[in-house]
Image (cartoon, helix red, strand yellow):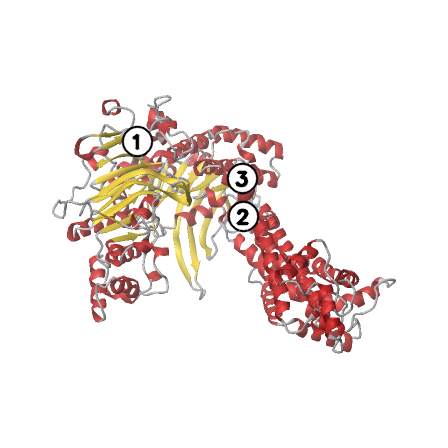
């Protein structure tokens, strides 16, 4: 319950920052909407229509109320409701993020746990080296390397990911998404591998794992029943953090591949000084982030019997 | 062992079948970072026959745990078998692979560790952990294992045996968990049990219970056992044979009564000599009165304290209720009680680390500000704290001269070049060589670190030193030396000590006065000789009778007494009213003790017992 309250307060605080932050910026919405040649009367009329003549607090309140009811306002640049703009693109972002999560998370966790099973082995050392290098490499660098390798050298995959996915075959779909998803996977994998390895290793050195060894419990069962259960809390936390990152951090990758998702939309909003669009998307990202964090907290709570069954 | 080697050829065949475990010239080395090897166990031999308990005894570093683990073919990380054999049922386990060992562990040989709280997986239900080994090895079906577990819970006298298995480890008490670990070890019907200090971490009143249960169940199951401990009194109760270890070598071995009553080897004699005498009247140290003044050095008056947010003058978790203690100048007050009774909380209140929720702390007759931030530097200087764990209390990255020099400078005792002089004085005071000033804490032994820890407190020229379990983590002989040092310091410096311990024998030999705490209330206090002689508070009586004697048969005798019956596991909890001991007290008056706060009955020389019964009824 307290976590929920904290989450709500976070969302509220972010909404204030987003709203007033965009207000502080130079430029007037009515002016932008009507263009440079508009007469002062027209601008005044537009300001009244948009509610910009009212006090700041009232504007904020109306905006927040509208956001809660699902009305994100009307885009300044395109003059269509924001929800409509998003409606086209949110699926695209969800597909990329979702696929990345589906592929990247289990593979990274497996790799990390394997590393913890054989600490100090050649596999473990290579894994550590690669994951550390990946942490250090920014997305656009990884993406460039991949494009160089696959598109230019091997001629498979698409460097620019546009167009509808309807009616494409499996192979074409793989070609379509391969590069952005691989890039994103690399980005989240490094952290996931390192954290899951560290979490499991930490538990593996505990007295109850030694006890399990001395009870003659097979290695596989020690890892998956005794160790993993206790490492779950921290692992779930890292997974949630990385998923949250996927939602917001796809910006670079989407822009790099020219992919029509939410992130490219917000970049467009910035370019066209579309305050309403930025506000709406900013709030949306914040909301997803807070919800994911909340899920992580609940999962950590559920995986700890001390919290689940108090004395 | 001696009788074994004496046995003639005809019976030899028979007896060798009865040998469950035999170590033959066993050698184990530690592998260092540079791959050089250091011998830890230097050729140890002994035998364990069926139905027999063999105790490995020695101080820390004697290799006793390492040897006991070899019976499972296991070496802690960083160790390796370097020679000799560990024969379990005539098969050498040191040469077996992990895969070969797996079916043996938990099935032929089982292990009980020192801390059950750490060896139970916190995320798995107790019953699954207890039955895991036999079910995994296929020697029992889950149902058979459950049935066996239930029988063991009953034999171990665990409360609510039908349902205790479906709880998580954190939901049962420490003593119960220790017995559940025994159930876990015995569930696979092992031929050999390895018990590593299984009662060391327990309170004395709980230890009796657990020892009794272990002894009963080992006999019942007909298993052989290796019992590792440093405590000769415990050994006398449970072992048939004793192997005395020092520095990885066997110093002496033989039947328990021979070793206990007629030790031959000088080391064994030293061990026997270091056994603390039983707490009795007449041991109490009476320090001189030359430092006495009208006001007590430190006094705690009607103090309530606890943790969490304070509401209506009551903290969320109350630990102390209405505690009164006065420490006279140059005197030592021992605070005794079992884990969770509020000993350390009392010390924290005295030091100002924890502001009391009610009542006052007085220094030289003046009321001290409750919080440490509001106290003046000089008030801080006068009260110093010595922590139990020197390892964690000393900054590992500072040299000893910095650890000691810092308080000297902070409290303005010396400046510039004089700091070094003062540090040298302090080292001399705690009987350490002056070269130690340049060393780091990890280059010192446990006893030496504890001396530095003490010197750090003395660096401030304090008037009161609070010692929280300062000898508990040390080996018997080392601890006795530190205690000697404390006695000398008290004589020479006229400093008052508050000596907190769970060990009645240590307190009895050192303190002028004793305060017996139970569940956050003072049960009894007064001059040591008065407290340790009748009339007793019923809890004091239980404590005294629970201290194990190094005498064969003590456990059986004391287990029959009415005091022991009151040790039965019930929850120890601070109550809002009445006497918190009422639910364990054999003399409790129904309807009175639970409801009404007991009166403070004042006897001779400031002897106070808080009980509804008159002094006559308590003697």
| Pointer 3 residue | B168
Which mark is in front, 1 or 3? 3
Report the number of numbered marks.
3
In what element is the residue under mark 3?
loop
Q: Which mark is residue A213?
A: 2
Residue A263 position within the rendered picture, expressed as x and y whole percent measured from the top left: 71, 67
Depth order, front residue of B558/B264: B558
Q: Are tags 3 and 2 found on a single chain?
A: no
In what element is the residue under mark 2?
helix
Horizontally, residue B328 falls left or right of residue A311, namely: left
In what element is the residue under mark 1?
helix
Which mark is in front, 3 or 2? 3
Horizontally, residue B172 falls left or right of residue A126, namely: left
Chain ID for label 3? B
Depth order, front residue of A280/A102: A280
Which mark is in front, 1 or 2? 1
């Amino acid at each position: 319950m307290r976590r929920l309250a904290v989450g709500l307060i976070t969302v509220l605080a972010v909404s204030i920052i987003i709203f007033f932050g965009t207000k502080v910026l130079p430029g007037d919405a009515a002016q932008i909407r009507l263009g440079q040649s508009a007469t002062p009367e027209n601008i005044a009329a537009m300001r009244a229509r948009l509610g910009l003549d009212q006090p700041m607090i009232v504007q904020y309140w109306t905006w927040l109320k509208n956001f809660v009811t699902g009305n994100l306002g009307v885009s300044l640049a395109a003059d269509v409701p924001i929800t409509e703009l998003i409606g086209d693109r949110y699926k695209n972002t969800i597909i990329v993020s979702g696929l990345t999560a589906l592929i990247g998370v289990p593979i990274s966790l497996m790799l990390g746990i394997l590393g913890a099973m054989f600490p100090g082995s050649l596999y473990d050392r290579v894994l550590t080296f690669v994951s550390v290098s990946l942490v250090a490499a920014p997305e656009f660098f990884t993406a460039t390397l991949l494009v160089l390798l696959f598109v230019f050298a091997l001629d498979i995959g698409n460097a620019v990911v546009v167009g509808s996915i309807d009616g494409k075959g499996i192979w074409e779909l793989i070609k379509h998404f391969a590069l952005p998803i691989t890039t994103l996977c690399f980005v989240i994998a490094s952290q996931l591998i390192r954290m899951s390895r560290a979490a499991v290793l930490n538990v593996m050195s505990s007295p109850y794992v030694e006890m399990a060894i001395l009870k003659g419990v097979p290695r596989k069962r020690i890892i998956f029943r005794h160790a993993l259960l206790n490492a779950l809390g921290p692992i779930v936390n890292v997974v949630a953090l990385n998923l949250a990152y996927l939602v917001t951090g796809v910006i670079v990758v989407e822009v790099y591949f020219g992919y029509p998702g939410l992130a490219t939309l917000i970049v467009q909003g910035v370019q066209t000084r579309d305050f309403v669009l930025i506000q709406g998307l900013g709030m949306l990202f914040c909301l997803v982030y807070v919800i994911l964090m909340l899920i992580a907290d609940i999962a950590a709570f559920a995986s700890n019997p001390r919290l689940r069954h108090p004395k | 062992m001696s009788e074994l080697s004496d046995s003639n050829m005809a019976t030899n065949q028979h007896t060798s079948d009865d040998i469950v475990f035999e170590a033959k010239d066993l050698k184990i080395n530690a592998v260092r970072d540079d791959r050089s090897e250091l011998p830890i166990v230097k050729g140890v031999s002994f035998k364990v026959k069926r139905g027999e308990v063999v105790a490995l005894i020695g101080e820390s570093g004697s290799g006793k745990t390492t040897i006991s683990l070899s019976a499972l073919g296991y070496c802690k990380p960083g160790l390796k078998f370097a020679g000799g054999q560990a024969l379990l049922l005539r098969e050498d386990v040191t040469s077996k692979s992990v895969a070969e060992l797996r079916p043996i562990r938990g099935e032929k040989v089982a292990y009980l560790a020192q801390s059950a709280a750490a060896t139970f997986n916190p995320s798995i239900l107790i019953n699954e952990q207890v039955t895991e080994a036999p079910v995994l090895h296929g020697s029992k079906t889950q149902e058979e294992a459950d049935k066996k577990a239930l029988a063991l819970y009953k034999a171990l006298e665990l409360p609510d045996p039908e349902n205790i298995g479906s709880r998580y480890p954190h939901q049962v008490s420490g003593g119960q968990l220790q017995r559940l670990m025994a159930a876990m070890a015995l569930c696979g019907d092992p031929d050999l049990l390895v018990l590593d200090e299984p009662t060391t971490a327990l309170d004395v009143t709980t230890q009796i219970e657990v020892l009794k249960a272990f002894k009963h169940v080992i006999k019942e199951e007909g298993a052989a056992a290796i019992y590792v401990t440093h405590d000769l009194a415990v050994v006398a109760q449970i072992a048939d044979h004793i192997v005395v270890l020092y520095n990885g070598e066997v110093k002496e071995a033989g039947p328990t009564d021979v070793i206990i009553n007629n030790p031959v080897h000088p080391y064994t004699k030293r061990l026997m000599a270091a056994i603390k005498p039983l707490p009795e009247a007449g041991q109490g140290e009476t320090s001189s009165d030359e430092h006495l003044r009208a006001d007590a050095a430190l006094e705690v008056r009607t103090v309530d304290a606890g943790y969490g947010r304070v509401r209506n003058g009551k903290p969320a978790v109350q630990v102390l209720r209405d505690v009164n203690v006065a420490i006279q100048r140059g005197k030592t007050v021992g605070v005794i009680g079992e884990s969770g009774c509020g000993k350390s909380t009392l010390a924290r209140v005295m030091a100002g680390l924890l502001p009391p929720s009610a009542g006052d702390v007085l220094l030289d007759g003046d009321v001290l500000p409750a919080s440490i931030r509001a106290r003046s530097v000089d008030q801080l200087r006068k009260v110093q704290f010595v922590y139990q764990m020197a390892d964690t209390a000393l900054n590992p990255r500072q040299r000893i001269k910095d650890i000691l020099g810092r308080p000297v400078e902070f409290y303005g005792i010396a400046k510039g070049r004089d700091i070094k002089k003062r540090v040298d004085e302090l080292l001399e005071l705690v009987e350490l060589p002056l070269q130690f000033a340049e060393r780091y804490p990890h280059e010192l032994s446990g006893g030496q670190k504890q001396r530095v820890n003490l010197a750090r407190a003395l660096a401030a020229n304090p008037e009161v030193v609070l010692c929280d379990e300062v000898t508990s983590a040390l080996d018997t002989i080392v601890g006795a030396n530190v205690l000697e040092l404390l006695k000398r310091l008290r004589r020479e410096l006229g400093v008052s000590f508050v000596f907190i311990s769970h060990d009645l024998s240590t307190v009895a030999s050192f303190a002028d006065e004793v305060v017996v705490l139970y569940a956050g209330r003072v049960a009894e206090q007064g001059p040591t000789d008065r407290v340790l002689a009748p009339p007793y508070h019923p809890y004091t009586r239980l404590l005294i009778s629970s201290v194990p004697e190094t005498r064969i048969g003590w456990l059986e005798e004391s287990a029959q007494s009415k005091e022991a019956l009151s040790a039965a596991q019930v929850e120890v909890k601070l109550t809002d009213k009445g006497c918190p001991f009422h639910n364990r007290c054999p003399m409790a008056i129904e309807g009175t003790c639970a409801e009404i706060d007991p009166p403070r009955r004042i006897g001779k020389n400031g002897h106070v017992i808080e009980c509804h019964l008159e002094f006559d009824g308590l003697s």
